[in-house]
Every structure is written in C-alpha cells, then in structure tokens.
Amino acid sequence: MKYILAVILSLSILSVAHAQSQISNVATNTNVQQAIVSILMGAKDVGGDIYNSSKDVIGQSVEFVKTQAPDLVKEFLRWKFTQALLVSLFGLSIIGVALFIGRWFIKTADGDADVEVPGYLIGVFGTLIGSALFIFWIMDVVQIAVAPRIYLLEYVVKIVQSHH
C-alpha cells in the first residue's frame, strides 16, 4: 500500500509540475504574441507616417516639375541648338582650313608631285570630314529651329533605346 501511495503521490506531483509547465508555456506564448502584436502595430504606425511623408514629397516634386518643366525644356533646346550650331561651324572651318592648306601646298609645290599630292589629300580629306560634321549637325540645328517637339521626342526615344 505504501508503494501505491508513493506512486500516486509521485504521479500527482508530476501532473502538477506538468500543469504548471503548460500554464507557464501559455503565459509565455501570450507574452510573445502580445509583443509581436505590439511590434506590428508600431510598424504599422511608422509605415503610415512614411507613406504620408512620401506622398507629400511626391506631391511637392510633381508641382516642382510642373512649374520648372517649360523653362527646363527651353534651356535644353537652346543648349542643343548652340551645341549643334558650334559643331556645324567647326565643320565649315575644317573645310576652309583644309582647302587653304591644300591650296598652299599646291602653290608652293611648283610642279613637285611630292608636295602637290599631300596638298590634294589634305584638301580632299579635310573637306570630307568637315562636310560630314557640318551635314550631320546642321540637321539638328534645322530640326530644333523648325520642329523642337519632334527633336525632343526623338531625343527621348534615343535615350530610352540606348538603355535597353
């Protein structure tokens, strides 16, 4: 009988210990769940603040772009026009210098073929390079002067295509 009472007593002690462990686990799980809910609520509040701030900044950016875009486009077109015009004039100057140097070589050659040939080559190649520069860039000058919107659209398409 002593043994039976000892077994019953040890089983009841183990049951109580197990029950306390289960209660402790439930309490710990509840605390963990409450902590997670608290963290998520804080993240939700911070996320809402970030969203509202981002929305405000985006709104201000849109307004800035709306007010600055016309001036920006005018300045961009003026810059590209000036750049194309300068390169075109540079092409014309290459033609002029090449023809001048070529003619000088020919005049000083006095019938010497060793001097005349480089003079013709300088004149021909200088004229070709200058003409290519002039023709390529003068088309931008004309397009910006005549159809600036088309120039802008083509410029944007070039940029988009070059990045893909």
Image: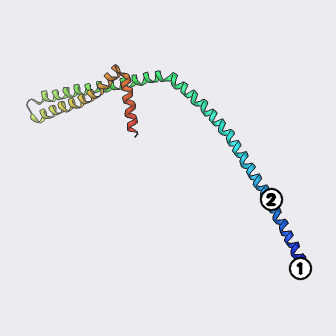
Report crowding for label 2: few under 14, some 14 to 19, many 20 or more residues within 10 A (C-alpha): few
Secondary structure of the residue carrying tag 1 is helix
Please state which amino acid type lies under the numbered disc 2.
Ser
Horizontal relation, residue 75 to residue 60: left or right: left
| Quarter containing the N terminus | bottom right
Please state which amino acid type lies under the numbered disc 1.
Tyr
The disc label shown at residue 3, or none:
1
**Quarter of image, res 84:** top left
Q: Position of residue 164 (x, y in %)?
A: 40, 40
**Quarter of image, res 79:** top left
Q: Position of residue 134 (x, y in %)?
A: 27, 27
Q: Are marks 2 and 1 in contact (CB under 8 Å)?
A: no
- Residue at (32, 23) in percent of width and height: 143
Q: Which sits in the foreground, 126 or 41?
A: 41
**Which numbered disc, 2 or 1, marks the residue closer to the eye?**
1
Residue at the extreme left:
111
Q: Which sits in the foreground, 116 or 151?
A: 151
Q: Which sits in the foreground, 133 or 142?
A: 142
Secondary structure of the residue carrying tag 2 is helix
Report crowding for label 1: few under 14, some 14 to 19, many 20 or more residues within 10 A (C-alpha): few
CA separation in Å, label 2 and label 1 = 31 Å
The disc label shown at residue 24, or none:
2
